[in-house]
């Protein structure tokens, strides 16, 4: 787990070592254990190291073998098995997973990616072929941002790192703004909120040639259809298969040369991870929970459930309670740590929790992704009973924050796209073949488009701000493939995640499983009072906000006059969504 950066210069130019060093300097928290740079003339690779596997200097990056060099962020969970497969042909100089990727590329070329199980953002330079490969893992767990400048391309693990290198167009993308306001601040790849910065999509290999031409190839796309291979399976067969796949996913993510803990919310997903790790013999496991003061009638913690799990499985449990007085001052640091603006109420919570974990561990497992993969959200329920051709209308009414007309009323005319760009993208994605039912289509949309830029990005940004590697077993590629083929009714049953709840009843205390679905609770950002009202008011009235002229003044003043009146269909506070964007733009000096 690290930060990577690089520059590729085209048509005989020389890449800028100084620009790469600037980007690396902006990502020191992603890799505080070492720094490396590789200058090959037309390509410069940079690396900030967080030592998890092979802690010795032999595991340092960028790693070079002849005409091939690599800089890599992530973890390859099956690297030991791959190494055994490759050892008859190659000599290894380290025990790192990085070197295994390097040898795998030398053996299989671009097909090396099909042999990897894990999370990764990879840059490989091949001077013989005069090309660079930029590769992102199947679920987009590890980020990879790019910018195209005159005669060169730069890439980095974070958007602010790219901006720090200079010359990047930091004006706002109107279509991305429409997405942000429509989908809980989600801006899917390849766009970002800035016109000059893009994201490599998940499950994509970008091949960049020395002459400046490039092309993307999607290398993995599960089918959300009923596979004949499983045609005779009963509900019990599916439950057993999912259980085995989840056990394997948890086991894979124990691979490390340092201890591994768990972020334990007390909900079903993270509790299952603790139970399965206990089955694997992980005694004295370190677990971490966070809670807050209540607000607006909402409880601020679920400690009663996380304590019960910790007691049942004998974990070394750390509880972090954050008062309202302490929470507000933590927001600017969390905003600064965001690669892109993220209005989810729990972003600052993850930032604070990661800080607490950083005093104990470098690696944790966590339950992100289970709701998207196994139909755990409330808006999934109506989709289980509507025809395939009603997927768009049903999903839109339950999920979308603002209609096209409402977005038009929120922003000044110059920021208006003139069309419903967000609905158009949803319609195109949901209409694609390869999904049998309305729920299949939406779960595919959630897992492969929206989730990447919501819980996945949130977890990466906030954990890496404190040099923590966060691993997500529910996004194991084999588990996701299996779940995609699973009949959607088994996933949506029992109010959502039915197949996981059946597993939970076998291994967890019943009160943890059979309770209303919780939400990582940060009541103070759902029901805004002081000092949060002053915080958002200052951001929206700041000179930068007035100069930018992004939101209509009557809209902003209406929100400030009634800060808790306007909510989205998923109960998010609209004032916080709007203010967070301004806070992020001001924090990073862009837009």
Image (tube, rainbow, N blue to C red):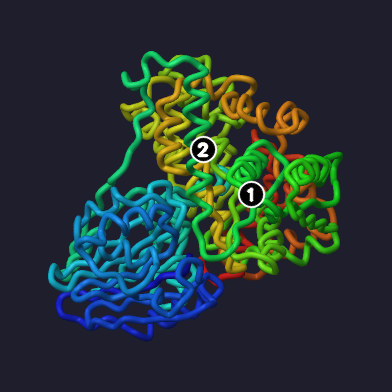
Location of residue 479 with respect to 284 vertically, above or below: above
Residue pictured at 33% horizontal, 38% vertical: 221
Residue 73 drawn above or below residue 453: below
* Label 2, residues with CA under 10 Å away: few <14, some 14-19, many ≥20: many
Pointer 1 or 2: first along the chain = 2
Q: Secondary structure at mark 2?
A: helix
- Which quarter of the figure has residue 110? bottom left
Q: Residue at x 86, y 39 (%)?
A: 297
Specify whether 568 is left or right of 50: right
Instruction: Select label 1 or label 2 by which is in front.
Output: 2
Residue depicted at x 49% and y 53%: 415
Task: Report crowding for label 1: few under 14, some 14 to 19, many 20 or more residues within 10 A (C-alpha).
Answer: many
SS assignment at label 1: loop
Most distant residue in the left direction? 128
Q: Is residue 515 visible?
A: no
In this picture, residue 300 sits left or right of residue 9: right
For label 1, the residue is 344
Residue named by callout 2: 246
Query: Which residue is located at x 34 percent, y 84 percent?
Result: 17
Residue 142 seen in the figure: yes
């Amino acid at each position: 787990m690290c930060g990577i950066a690089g520059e590729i210069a085209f048509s005989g130019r020389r890449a800028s070592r100084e620009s790469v060093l600037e980007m690396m300097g902006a990502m020191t928290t992603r890799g505080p254990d070492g720094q490396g740079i590789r200058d090959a003339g037309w390509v410069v690779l940079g690396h900030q190291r967080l030592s998890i596997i092979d802690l010795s200097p032999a595991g340092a990056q960028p790693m070079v073998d002849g005409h091939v060099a690599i800089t890599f962020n992530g973890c390859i969970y099956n690297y030991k098995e791959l190494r055994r497969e490759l050892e008859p042909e190659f000599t290894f100089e380290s025990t790192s997973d990085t070197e295994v990727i390097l040898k795998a590329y030398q053996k299989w070329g671009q097909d090396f990616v099909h042999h990897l199980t894990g999370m990764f953002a990879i840059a490989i330079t091949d001077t013989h072929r005069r090309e660079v490969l930029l590769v992102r893992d199947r679920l987009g767990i590890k980020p990879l941002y790019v910018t195209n400048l005159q005669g060169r391309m730069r890439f980095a693990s974070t958007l602010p790192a790219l901006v720090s290198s200079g010359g990047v167009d930091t004006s706002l993308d109107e279509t991305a703004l429409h997405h942000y306001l429509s989908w809980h601040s989600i801006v899917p790849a390849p766009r970002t909120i800035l016109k000059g910065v893009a994201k490599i999509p998940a499950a994509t290999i970008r091949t960049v040639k020395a002459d400046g031409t490039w092309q993307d190839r999607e290398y993995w796309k599960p089918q959300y259809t009923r596979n004949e291979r499983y045609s005779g399976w009963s509900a019990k067969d599916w439950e057993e298969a999912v259980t085995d796949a989840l056990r394997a996913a948890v086991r894979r993510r124990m691979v490390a040369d340092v201890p591994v803990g768990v972020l334990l919310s007390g909900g079903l997903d993270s509790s299952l991870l603790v139970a399965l790790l206990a089955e694997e013999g992980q005694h004295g496991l370190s677990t971490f929970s966070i809670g807050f003061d209540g607000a607006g009638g909402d409880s601020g913690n679920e400690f009663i459930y996380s304590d019960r799990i910790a007691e049942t499985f004998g974990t070394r449990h750390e509880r972090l309670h954050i008062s309202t007085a302490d929470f507000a001052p933590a927001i600017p640091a969390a905003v600064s740590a965001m690669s892109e603006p993220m209005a989810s109420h729990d972003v600052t919570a993850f930032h604070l929790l990661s800080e607490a974990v950083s005093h104990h561990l470098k690696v944790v497992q966590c339950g992100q992704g289970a709701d998207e993969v196994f139909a755990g959200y409330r808006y999934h329920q109506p989709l289980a009973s509507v025809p395939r051709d009603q997927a768009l209308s049903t999903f839109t009414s339950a999920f979308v924050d603002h209609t096209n007309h409402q977005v038009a009323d929120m922003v000044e005319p110059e920021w208006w796209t003139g069309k419903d760009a967000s609905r158009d993208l949803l319609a195109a994605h949901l209409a694609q073949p390869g999904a049998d039912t309305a729920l299949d289509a939406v779960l595919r949309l959630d897992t492969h488009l929206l989730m990447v830029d919501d819980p996945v990005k949130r977890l990466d940004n906030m954990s890496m701000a404190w040099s923590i590697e966060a691993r997500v077993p529910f996004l194991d590629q084999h588990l996701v493939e299996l779940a995609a083929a699973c009949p959607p009714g088994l996933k949506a049953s029992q109010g959502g995640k039915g197949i996981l709840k059946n597993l939970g009843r076998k291994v967890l205390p019943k009160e943890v499983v059979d309770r209303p679905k919780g939400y990582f609770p940060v009541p103070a950002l759902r029901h805004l009072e002081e000092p949060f009202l002053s915080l958002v008011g200052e951001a929206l009235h700041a000179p930068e906000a007035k100069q930018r002229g992004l939101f209509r003044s009557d809209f902003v003043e209406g929100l400030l006059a009634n800060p808790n009146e306007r909510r989205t269909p998923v109960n998010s506070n609209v004032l916080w969504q709007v203010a967070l964007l301004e806070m992020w733009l001001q924090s990073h000096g862009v837009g």
